[in-house]
Image: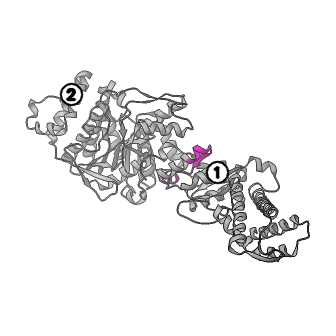
Amino acid sequence: MDAGLVALAYYLAYWFRFDGEIPAKYSDLFWRTLAFAICGSLVCFVIAGMYRHWMRYSSQREYLKIAEGTVLAVLALIGYVVIIQPVLVVSVDGLRPLTVPSGVLLVFGLLTAALITATRFVAHVIFMRGVTGWRTRRSGRKVLIVGAGSGGHLLEGELRKNPELGYRPIGYVDDNKKGADILGTTFDLDEILEDVEPDEVMIAIPSASGELRGRVVIACREHGVSVRTVPTVFELLQGGNHLTRQLREVRVEDVLGRNPVRMEIESVGGYLTGRRVLVTGAGGSIGSEICRQIARVNPSRLVLLDHSEANLFEIEREMVDERHVQTSVSVLADVKDEERMREVFAQHEPEIVFHAAAYKHVGLMEANPIEAVRNNALATRTLTNIAGEAGTLSFVLISTDKAVAPATVMGASKALAEWAVESANARFGGTAFCAVRFGNVLGSSGSVVPIFRRQIAAGGPVTVTDPEMTRFFMTIPEAVQLVIRSGSLAGGGEVYALDMGEPISIMALAQQMIEFSGLKVGRDIGIEIIGRRPGEKLHEQLFNSYETPEPTPAEKIRRAGRPGVDPAWVEYVFDKVGLLVAEGDAAALAAAVAELSTGRTAMVETSAEPSGGTAS
């Protein structure tokens, strides 16, 4: 089409220049140069980038490319006529080269640009706005889809089948595919957004890496384009079938850290199928996700235990009403109540236990050390004893990286819980006890992310304790998936640590969350450095100095190789700590558990004479 338009413009240029009466010598010049005018113009158009996108996506940027291509075409024509193929004619003065008149060149350039621009504009109107239904055109939002795979095509189909949603897909962006509808890669997104000017960008790659999502979000923020995403693989497995109903804003959780590990929960959690499973803390952020994933492998009974009535009610309604799990049983109970726990084990006879019930807010636990130790340490010891006596097959403790070289009451209480698990494993040979240690999970009730989100919503400032502070982060579904996989590895007495990837700067996290909210750091919301709280570390670790990371058959799961501990010594320590809890001596208890920060090795070395020791 462009070739025909160039030919028409070239002819009309001569026709207008000579008022319809083209002299013979210029008519001959026209026919001698027509082929180059057409072919040379098309080459110049390619060089200018006019054929990178479909005509329907033409915009102001595309029209500038037409102008560039037209100028190049005129210059190329001049060079061809004057330099490459001069045309000689006989005149009274002898032989001289005949060139294209300047008037012809000017009109040729103007007509070429006008005709090609008009065709692009008409195509844009027809394909992108339509020729009827102006009201629909005004209300419809142009959508650019990131991902041309099955997810992208499914999303496009949903949008087209539901015009009442008011979306018009205009093309794809994909890093790995080629095709007419694919406008480029995410690395070209700045230019693509200028070209097609979408109203919204939708990421349709459930398995997209955080890096890719971040690249898309940053480009869209700079151009003022809203961006949403289909759920992650984990969320899709848990939700319904309609992608358009699950579209949501991109969260900071989606772009932080490394690519998540994806396992088939049906295979790695197959050991739970047909089993009676008990989950303590079932209404919490970690416990509820454990319940969701276990429900997919069809346990014979899923016992949901929680001390919070509201949390238990929510997870029960989700299991029954949304997921139609008919084997779930809700138990309102406190893990600190030994008699009640024995009743639960006697009634439901759980074969597998996931112990997720714990207090985890560091500041609160520093202010309430007695409850921290009572709930996190003593209750775990009680539960391990009950499970071992009941013949439970496997017991999995959800631990934390703060149990490594603990510097806070919360960390020390979880370190004691790990000891309780190891001691129980030595005393109850029929039960495989293990602990799974990991860092912060994004979106959990104890995570910094919800705190930052609330501070941003309130207008700031966002508070950071130390600009050098880093933390490990992992999404809740991924962490739980690996916890369940760790349970299948348990032979007895292991402490597993999940590979959390590289630690993330808390300062960088705060800046990212502010920018994700469409705001500017310093201009719209400030970041305030408030100083570290007592016992707060700059950097967390997943292994103690006396532990050796060892590989396991599972990806992203390592075992902490460490010297054994004398169960008698552990029982002695728990008896002493339990006595301080019973006496309500918070100061003495805090001082005692603080001694755990010296490391387990020192305690093991002094375990030869438990009767002469102290609570620390």
Is residue 231 rendered magenta in the image? Answer: yes
- Residue 130 rendering spot, x and y as whole percentages: 78, 56
Q: Residue at x 82, y 62 (%)?
A: 103
- Closest to the observer: 416 or 430? 416
Q: Position of residue 310 (x, y in %)?
A: 48, 34
- Relative to 491, is 362 on the left or the right? right
Magenta stretch: give its range: 219-236
Within the image, what quadrant is residue 366 found in?
A: top left
**Tag 2 secondary structure:** helix
- In the rendered image, which quarter contains the C terminus? top left
Say whether residue 52 is visible: no
Crowding at dot 2, Cα within 10 Å, few <14 / some 14-19 / many 20+, comes out as some
Q: Is residue 447 above or below residue 236?
A: above
In the image, farthest residue toward the front: 93
- Amino acid under disc 2: Ala
User: Is residue 28 at least partly visible in the picture?
Assistant: yes
Residue 194 - label: 1
Give the side of residue 48 with respect to residue 28, left or right: left
